[in-house]
Image: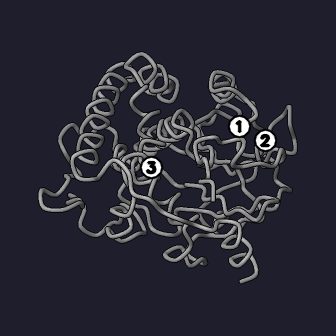
Amino acid sequence: MEKLKYDDIKAFVHDDDLIKLLCYDKTSDELFEDFVKDDFLKIDSGMKIPFFAEIRDYRGAIEKNSPESQWLVKPIKGKDVIESAMAMISFFMDLFTHTLSVPVIVTKIDNVLYKATKLINKAEQLSGANYTVYPELIEQLVLDIVNRWITYDEDRNPNNYLIKYNSKNQNLVLAIDFGNCDLLYKDIKIKGLAKGFGWQKKEKTRYLTPLKTDNFVSYGMDFYNIRFDYFRKMDSKTLYSICKKALRFDPDKDTYSKTITNNILRRINYVYKYFAAKLPETIEKKNDYNAMGKTFQQM
């Protein structure tokens, strides 16, 4: 059966309403311009928001020009500003590398700084799915480790992903919650193991992925290059521009942007070389994705 083309975002997402919900109806430049405008959102006190968001002090907001687009927003200050800006950079990198994730930005509403994330209704947390069995779920998580290793995001448990269905019964795995990524760490924080494929982390109590290491060696570089091909096209000019936009409220934005740009380029090179050294070029796999999707949805 023909392999799913995870990097062809619009084709994979398939449904026009989902494409718009996840902001893939616009180019990266258009989104950058939209997301760095102050007061493009307004607080909607009557908006119904999930309980988990409400107890974390989030509020509902809508886009002024598109009221059907709903967001969850939370006031930020102090270290939360730089952490939220790094989350925004991580989302922009996902966008550039054709990775499914939920938009998260730093913005101003009525002269107050907020962290804002797009509200995804009628979605399930990954923790409720048997993601260790179904190839379509496994493969999206396998690819996701490339992004999280490069951004040093060590808090990737099943609650950090949502599953959204499209009309073809395919399961779209959406990465959320990038608040624990670390783009400022200059040394190697996640080191590839010398014997066999795997990693050693500074943070012993956090997850880099919900999957076990065995899942990753079942795929060759031809599969991982779905993600690496885009990462390796990132240059210093592109990264610096992304960082400056995300860090625009920080007085040290120039210094931080240079540091993050250099860190990311160095990490891309390191992670790619490690994968290429440890994994074969290709491994043949056969998967019946359509049957899997129907079975999972019935469950």
Q: Secondary structure at mark 2?
A: helix
Say the numbered circle drawn on residue 20: 2
Q: Position of residue 25 (x, y in %)?
A: 76, 34
Residue 165 vs residue 213: left or right? right
Q: Nearer the viewer, residue 153 or 255?
A: 153
Above or below, comparing residue 290 to residue 47 in the picture: below
Report the amino acid beneath label 1: Tyr
Where residue 120 sits in the image (x, y, percent)?
72, 56
Name the residue beneath numbered marker 1: 24
Please report the residue visible at 65 percent of the width from the left and 58 percent of the height from the top. Answer: 172
Q: CA distance from mark 1 to mark 3?
A: 23 Å
Task: Estimate the spatial distance between the alpha carbons at disc 2 and disc 1, rounded to whole Å.
Answer: 6 Å
Instruction: Give x and y (percent) for residue 112.
Output: 62, 36
Q: Position of residue 139 (x, y in %)?
A: 51, 60
Q: Quadrant of residue 219?
A: bottom left
Tell me, for residue 223, which label it has, or none: 3
Marks 2, 3: nearer the viewer: 3
**Residue 35 located left or right of residue 121:** left
Circle 2: residue type = Lys
Q: Quadrant of the C terminus?
A: bottom right
Label 2 CA crowd tier, 10 Å (few <14, some 14–19, many 20+) = few
SS of the residue under disc 1: loop
Crowdedness near tag 3: few (<14), some (14–19) or many (≥20) residues, C-alpha within 10 Å? some
The numbered mark at residue 259 is none
267 or 213, which is in the foreground?
213
**Of pointers 1 and 3, the one earlier in the residue sequence:** 1
Q: Are marks 2 and 1 in contact (CB under 8 Å)?
A: yes
Image quadrant holding the N terminus, namely bottom right
Q: Secondary structure at mark 3?
A: helix
Residue at left offset 19%, top offset 52%: 191
Kindly identify the amino acid type of the residue bearing the numbered disc 3: Phe
